[in-house]
Amino acid sequence: MDLSSGKTYWDHTYKGFTYPVLENDVECDVLIVGSGSSGAHCAYFLADQGVSVTLVDKRTIASGSTVANTGLLQYSNDKMLSAMIRSFGEKAAVRHYQLGLEAIQTLNEEVVPSLAENSDFKIRKSLYFASSKEDVASLQEEFKTLKKYGFPADYFTKSQIEKYFSFSKEGAIVTGNDAEVNPYKHAHLLIHYAEQKGVKIYEHTKINGRKHTKEGDILYTDKGHSIKAKYIIYATGYEAQEEVRDPNGSIISSYALATNPVGNIDGWYDDMMLWETARPYIYARRTADGRIVFGGLDEATTKVDKRDTKLIHKRDLLMQTIYDMFPELKGKTMAEYYWGAFFGETHDGLPTIGTYEDYPNSYFLRGYGGNGTVYSVILSQIIRDLILKGKNDNSYIYLKERPMLERIM
Ligand SMILES: Cc1cc2nc3c(=O)[nH]c(=O)nc-3n(C[C@H](O)[C@H](O)[C@H](O)COP(=O)(O)OP(=O)(O)OC[C@H]3O[C@@H](n4cnc5c(N)ncnc54)[C@H](O)[C@@H]3O)c2cc1C
């Protein structure tokens, strides 16, 4: 799959580490296929746990969708908590939101401090604004719901928004304890950490064959080597749909850009991350070197040609939206990097862990959704527990069969 095109930003900010191609046969306890955000968090959480772990990627580290990721980490996500409760019941929906909050806390307190350097991770607030007057009622209902269950949130009125920002909106929820990260650097540093703890890492190593035996699956690389593992984690991102399609998953196209460094912006209070109630939504954040990263304008296409012919037009529309929101930036700002990429989401709004009879002892980690990095953190810890302890109390929320629906029916 041609996951992205154009000029991505994060790979220009960080050199990263390189790893060898796999040149021999391997036996291990756990094989992780994929080195993006999902595979990197799996490697991190499985490192030093008394199991032998091997990770392979057909590309270089984190060069799949993770390099196209804009790095907003939020406990709130594409489907509001109030809507989640209606779909999945109170218990699973609230727990899912809590797990998002806990994932960001785990990154802040445990993961990032353990890395060789900071992955440009910073705790930030988000401004989730009403895209239109009609959305204010559902936004206020969402605010009440978040407060009811103890999530860190405030409400900004139109006049507060106008006081703090260059633009005007009818209302907004401000969520706390969110964060921003350089997703490419972060994945590299996680994998470097894992390698230091004994995880074997190989890049330019494609899995292109599989043999099913009584003892488990043997996977084969494009160089003809075998990897025999007791457990396999398919952290292959949107390309997992090519191996086993999850009917709940859906791939579309999305667009993003990074401007030149513009320094402090008076009309952008507290460098909050910005997003909105419209679907598809636009979203924005600042970077460590003072750029604006801005994305959105999704298109319902899985055709590379169709995605790419719209890239320049989408870049110009995104820039125009920046000027509409921050008129003071006109004439001072331009898109230095811009890219189009495939983007995966699920129809029901939750990411999935897939297990299949034909793939014994294997887990498909599909962190699909705009909050994919937070989902990588949640799902990789659950899969670690399923492998090491045989259970995790939160797995029922994410198993592709959606067992919690049986409880609320
Ligand atoms: C424009 C855009 C903006 C986004 N913004 C955000 C955001 O702000 N916040 C957020 O949390 N998420 C965001 N996302 C989503 C985020 O990018 C994804 O959730 C995340 O990168 C997925 O990581 P992954 O590891 O699952 O997939 P990937 O990064 O694609 O990693 C999968 C890896 O598997 C490897 N692989 C596949 N098949 C094989 C094989 N057969 N053999 C060996 N290796 C294989 C690939 O080479 C790849 O490196 C955004 C996505 C896009 C496109």
Image: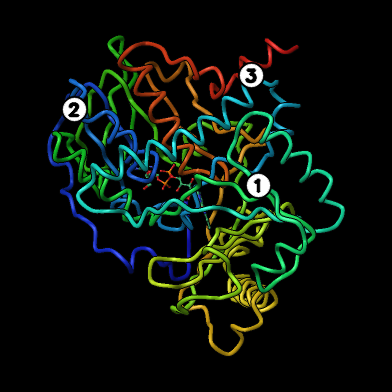
Distance, label 2 to label 3, CA atoms, is 33 Å
Q: Secondary structure at mark 3?
A: helix
Residue tagged 2 = 48
Amino acid tagged 2: Asp
- In the displayed structure, 15 sits above or below 140; it is below
Residue tagged 3: 91
Seen in the picture, residue 202 relative to 309 is either above or below; the reply is above
Residue 204, image x, y percentages: 25, 50
The picture quadrant where one finds residue 78 is: top right
Q: Is residue 405 visible?
A: yes
Q: Does the beta carbon of the residue at mark 2 sit less than 8 Å from ligand 1?
A: no
Amino acid of disc 3: Lys
Q: What crowding class fits label 3: few (fewer than 14 Cα within 10 Å), some (14-19), or many (20 or more)?
A: few
Disc 1 residue: CB within 8 Å of ligand 1: no
Q: Which residue is mark 1?
A: 154
Q: Residue 273: where, in percent of width, then height?
A: 55, 58
Between 263 and 341, which is closer to the camera in this rendering?
A: 263
Q: Quadrant of the C terminus?
A: top right
Between marks 2 and 3 in the image, the one whose residue lies nearer the viewer: 3
**Which numbered disc, 2 or 3, marks the residue that appears first in the sequence?**
2
Image check: 146 left or right of 110? right
Q: What is the crowding at mark 2: few (fewer than 14 residues within 10 Å), some, or many (at least 20)?
A: some
| Of residues 133 and 160, the one drawn nearer to the viewer in this rendering | 160
Does residue 208 show up? no
